[in-house]
Image (tube, rainbow, N blue to C red):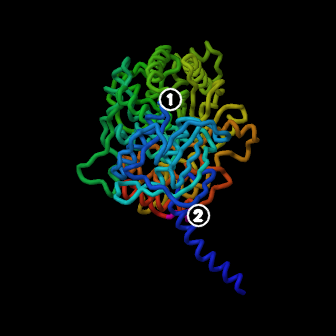
Amino acid sequence: NTTTKKIALLLMLFFPLMAFAQHKISIIPQPVSLQLTNGSFVIDGETFIRIDNEKKELKPAAEFLTAYIKQVSGHELPIKKRKGKSIQLAIAEIDGIGDEGYQLEVTPAGISIRANTKAGIVYGMQSLMQTLPQVRTNAALEVPSMKITDYPRFKWRGMHLDVSRHFFSPEVVKQYIDLMASYKMNTFHWHLVDDTGWRIEIKKYPKLTEVGAWRVDQTDKAWDSRPQAKAGEKPTYGGYYTQDQIKDIVAYAALRNVTVVPEIEMPGHVASAVAAYPHLSCAQKPQLPLTGGDYTDMSSNYCPGNEEVYTFLEDVLDEVVALFPSRYVHIGGDEVDKSGWKKCARCQARMTAEGLKNVEELQSYFIKRMERYLLTKNRSIIGWDEILEGGLAPQATVMSWRGEAGGIEAAKMKHNVIMTPGNPVYFDHYQAGPEGEPLAIGGFNSLKRVYDYEPIPKELSQEEAGYVLGAQANVWTEYITTAEHLEYMVLPRMLALAEVVWSPRESKDWTSFNNRLQRHFRGFEQRGLHYAPGNFTVDI
Ligand code: TNX
């Protein structure tokens, strides 16, 4: 009948329009609520950024937005106080959006971003920037009218980067932080120490970087087997960050609401430190140059029986906390081969003196001592889930990497937990293939598996679930040799994780995510970013 026909006709007209409008707004992570309204606002040479005078704290945020708009349009928007055709940034008191939420409203008269904090303002800007072109254009910057109310599900939205197995320059680290920030990831876990390289300048112990940052062994299985490796080209094994470079990176991250959490590994994975200062290990070998590869034997761990080790680490941590304002310092604790400690007379003496029954308790003694020291500096420790063995330090946060079991155990003990299970959030694992993919450590974490990840395990009660601060992807770089390769491993999987940790659980929708992803892929192409393009919905 005619009514049905009319409805069908209306729907036919309406749906393509809706699809078009939705396509223009492809924000990742999906906002809590997004309503499209009528009309649009055009940012042009007349537009200015409006902030109230007394809110000086918003000036850096305003400048950040100005720089972006200038980059994509050439328009240099002035920052003013008055009303008019503007993008207004305002700190307000808004219920229900917490300290990272924001409201973004676009009408034909102007744009406003309101939030309780600077962090929220910056996230509102990130959402706005996702609706704008990604590269320089002469087209009008037209933003559809809409109203967004948005806030995160988890407070720890992390990305880790191992800069020890391969070194990445400060520029690459900044670009990594930039990418994180565009997707509202807020914690950068910087793995600065491992066997293959000590990457942070410590003024009191210059050999850490003079010796410990430079490998002499230049063979590299991962690099040499890369089909794309060109003759004569070599990845960067050596290097470190000066304290000035670190301060600069920490400030760069802070402007984007990214907290940098340093990881200073101990008591294992420290062949680099031991190469520089051999008296720190039980073996007490003479100084040797640092070779490549991972070590787990007694000559590459700190000696928990030697008092000088604690003095050394306290000195190192003094310099570390002066550089990083983060409340947390990650002190590692993973994969220590403790068999050497059984053969070490000083370790045995320490165990007797402290009444420790086994080497697990010796490691726990070590970690607890470091926690006590950091607490005097008002810092809390995070450790990999091995720190549960032999007794968990009283206030430690546990990073659960060998699956979720450690995290579940810690949450039940009322300790904070960050979920980083190897499956599915290790981004050093394959995302497709393995045929045609760059050589990676085993494991298969497809985009879909990352998207389907749920950080709250079923085993936890509602109260226990409250101890799960959030989730994080870890990016180990044994096989990741260049900045391009790093981009490829992280894009687009980081976008899936961003939606896991930011968007409401009920609103997760794989099809919608894939549709929105297309616009981001175009942006990556325009910006020359490497990404894994496939639609890897088929698991192997
Ligand atoms: C385990 S995850 C490690 C790293 C390796 C990684 C490779 C963790 C705490 N330790 O040292 O790089 O596997 O996937």
> Horizontally, is 486 left or right of 402 in the view?
left
Of 310 and 454, the residue lying toward us:
454
Identity of the amino acid at label 1? Glu
Report which quarter residue 79 is drawn in.
top left
Specify which label sits upstream in the sequence, 2 or 1: 1
Of 304 and 499, the residue lying toward us:
499
Of 305 and 67, the residue lying toward us:
67
> Horizontally, is 17 left or right of 72 in the view?
right
Q: Which residue is mark 2?
A: 511
Main secondary structure of the magenta stretch: loop
Q: Residue at x 50, y 37 (%)?
A: 257
Whether residue 438 can be seen here: no
Secondary structure of the residue carrying tag 2 is helix
> Horizontally, is 385 left or right of 474 in the view?
right
**Quarter of the picture holding the N terminus:** bottom right
x, y percent for residue 305: 52, 17
Per the image, is 539 magenta? yes
Q: Which residue is mark 1?
A: 54
Please state the extent of the stretch shown in magenta in the rendering.
Answer: 535-540
Q: Residue at x 60, y 72 (%)?
A: 14
x, y percent for residue 51: 48, 37
- Residue found at the very far front of the displayed protein: 83
Identity of the amino acid at label 2? Thr
